[in-house]
Structures are given as C-alpha cells and as structure tokens.
Image: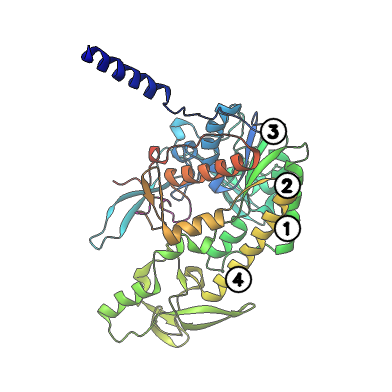
Amino acid sequence: MKTIRLHIYIIAGLLLLGACKPNIDTPKPSHGSADFTRYIAVGNSLTAGYADGGLYLAGQMVSYPSIIGKQMQSVGGGAFSQPLFSTTQANGSGYLSLTGFNPNGTPITTPVTTNLAITGQQAIPGFGNVTLYAKYSGEINNYGVPGIKLFHITYAPYGNLNGYYERLLSGNEGTHTTAYLDFVTAKPFTFFSNWLGNNDALGYATSGGAGDVLTDKNTFAQLYGLLISKLTANGQKGVVGTIPDVTSVPYFTTITVGAILGAVQKANPAAQALFINALVSGTTYAPRPATAKDLIVLTFPTSMIGQPVSTPYGTLPYGLTPYSPIDNQYVLDQNEIALTEDYINSYNATIKSIAATNGLAVFDAYTFLNNIKQNGLVVDGVSVNSGYISGGLFSLDGVHLTPRGYAIVANEFIKAINGKYGSSIPAVNISDYNGVKFP
C-alpha cells in the first residue's frame, strides 16, 4: 500500500513539474513598420562585396546586402538580385590570393589572373584608360559600385569613367549619360540601405594625401541631402551607415615606422630615423623624421629603404636623409591624418543629422569598427579583431572586409533596422562565414 501511495506521489510530482515548465515564447517574424518587398542597396565597393583588392563572384555572393536581403525574406522581403559575374568569369577584376608566408612571417600574396571578366580598355579623352568588364543586364537590387564617391552620384557621364558602373548600363562605353542617382531610383522600391561616402575620404587617405582630394564638407552635405530626399521621395524607409575611421584599417596599421627603422638599424646601427615629406599646412610640405603617429601604407615596398637614389645633393639612401624622403604616396602623415579625421567627423555629423530628420535607422560603422580595433569582438563563439590577416575581419587589401567581416556588418545593419522599425529580421551565424583563406 505504501509503495502504491509513493508511486502516486511521484507521478503527481512529475505532472506538477511538467505543468510548471516555463513557456519559451519565440517572437513571430515581423516586418514591423517597414516594407521589405523590394530592398535596394546603394553604395560603393563595400556594398558590392569587393575584397582582396578586387571584385569577384565569391565576394559578391557574401556582400552584406545579399546577406541582409536573404534574411529579410523571412519577414516579407522579396528576391534580392545582384549583378554577379558568370561562373566562367568568376574571378571578375582579379584579386589577391594568400599563397604562403616568408621565413620572417610576412605574407606572400599572388594576383589571380585567370577567368577574369575584363573585356578590354577604352581611352576616354581628358580622363585616361577605363577598364571594361562583361556587361550585366538582369535585375539589380545591389547597386554597389566600387570607386564611386558621393561626389559622383549626379555626374551624368560617370558611367564612362568607371567600368564597374559601365557594366550595369545599356549602350556602348563613351555614350553613357545616366547619373548614378537616377539609375538606382529608376525602378520602384520599398526599402533601402545606403553606405555611400567612404570613398570621399578613403581616396585621399590611401593615396597618402597625394593622389586625391577630400570632398568639400558643404558639397558632401548638399549631395547627401539630395540623395536621401530622392531615396525617401515616396515614403520609403531605410538604413544608412556612417563612414568608418579609414585611418584605423590594416592598410595603415600593419607596416609601422618603428618596424621599418628597427630592420634598418640591424644592418646599419648608425641610422637614426626615417624621413618623410610631411604636410606643414595648406599645401606646404617639408621633410622631417617620421614618428609613430605617421602611417605607412600597406603597399609600401620596404625594400626601397636605403637604396641609392639620385637627388640634387648627390646619390643618397632612400628614406634615410631629409634630402631623400619617402614619397608622399606611401605615407599619411600626422597632419594629413588630422585633416582626414576632421572631414570624416563632419561627414558623419551630416549623415546622422539627415537620417534623424528623415526618421531613418543608422548603423554607426565609425564607432562599431573603432571599438573592434580597440577591444576586439567575440560573436557566435568567433573572435575577430582588426589585425591584418589573423584578425579575420579585413581581407588581403587591408581595407575591405572578409566574408566574416561582411556578415558581422550585415548583422549590425539588421540590428539597426529592427531597433528602428520594430521588425524581427533574424541575424546570421557568424561562424558560417570565413575570414582570410589560408593556403
């Protein structure tokens, strides 16, 4: 009898435990107050999926807009089409591949030159040669164009000057008159992302302040206002990204003044400094010793240091005297850095202000990527940082992202969209995407 009663108590206890089991409510997928029926992405190389110094099919397939577009489909989003290269021309413009490491640990990168989509070159009077790519004529949701600046979006002949844009346009090279802003808004759309403006600072920085100029702040503000007014003309909602701190990417942080000088002093202990031709003010430059606050670009051929070069003062070792300084194109000096950062801060204030006025979501890429540089990031069990190659975030060109980096950015855009519009677009698992591919 006691045994039967004990069993009854146990069964009753189990039933009670089952009855008290907490319910886990999974939010139903929702588009919130946004309409994702036709989502378009406006932007430059980062939007296109550019990586490793080129645009190619594998990179296009993991562009952050394509990731966002796929995730949107669970909350009412439509198909997301990209201007992909064909499988027979999958290597697109060509790109860099990691093929090994030197004995000192420095990477060996090799250009991929097969199965390209390059169809030739066209000489444009007053501009120069433009590389042409195989045309694309299908549907487009991803309007990312490598190289484009905000400064270019209203320039009608721009399709004749940029082969990546030219391949999206009908007609022959040299005959294009469709401004980018008109092209991306020609078909109805319901939602947009916009990450234009990076190149308005990046071109100046990556050329060491020697091969490009920073877009005027007022011009930037006028064009950004025009862009957003056109993108929201029919009540569309969207998300915008701020401009990253371009001086914090591996392109500027991998090769340091201290490392170069240390290598020189091993062979020549008498060497006291590296010399650069640095900005003084305005357009005035003067040679001075480099410091840790000056940034050497990733593409600088360090083997040039100490090589004999002809100067008005005779033959001197390159980079080791004030009469044979490192060329401007290889260095973003301290004053050029300050100038770049001043313009980026102005651009970002404009972006945030116009986004607020129009009720748009904002992904603060400047703050987010700087935080990764300072503290690293662990997400979905994957650790990333801003280190070159090993960090997993930046590709071999030191500026653009890896598939993992693009997935992280996609999730941040999604987070901003969900927060602003009450949608529940699901995030992707970062561990599904790779960093730099090792040989």
Amino acid type of the residue that numbered disc 4 sits on in the rendered structure: Leu
Q: Which residue is mark 1?
A: 221
Q: Earlier in the sequence, mark 2 or mark 1?
A: 1
Q: Earlier in the sequence, mark 2 or mark 4?
A: 2
Q: Earlier in the sequence, mark 3 or mark 4?
A: 3
Q: Are marks 2 and 4 in contact (CB under 8 Å)?
A: no
Q: Which residue is mark 2?
A: 228
- For the residues marked 2 and 3, what is the alpha-carbon distance in whole angstroms? 14 Å
Is residue 179 visible in the rendered image? The answer is no
Q: Earlier in the sequence, mark 1 or mark 4?
A: 1
Q: Are marks 1 and 3 in contact (CB under 8 Å)?
A: no
Q: Which residue is mark 3?
A: 190
Q: Earlier in the sequence, mark 1 or mark 3?
A: 3
**Residues shaded magenta:** 390-400
Where does residue 299 sit, x and y in percent of width and height?
A: 42, 62
Where does residue 302 sit, x and y in percent of width and height?
A: 36, 69
- For the residues marked 1 and 4, what is the alpha-carbon distance in whole angstroms? 17 Å
Q: Is residue 216 above or below residue 14?
A: below
Amino acid type of the residue that numbered disc 2 sits on in the rendered structure: Ile
Please tell me whether residue 151 belongs to the stretch shown in magenta: no
- For the residues marked 1 and 3, what is the alpha-carbon distance in whole angstroms? 24 Å
Q: Is residue 373 above or below residue 413?
A: below
Q: Which mark is residue 339?
A: 4
- Secondary structure beneath disc 3? loop
Amino acid type of the residue that numbered disc 1 sits on in the rendered structure: Ala
Is residue 303 visible in the rendered image? The answer is yes
- For the residues marked 3 and 4, what is the alpha-carbon distance in whole angstroms? 38 Å
- Secondary structure beneath disc 2? helix
Q: Residue furthest front?
A: 1
Q: Residue at x 53, y 31 (%)?
A: 70
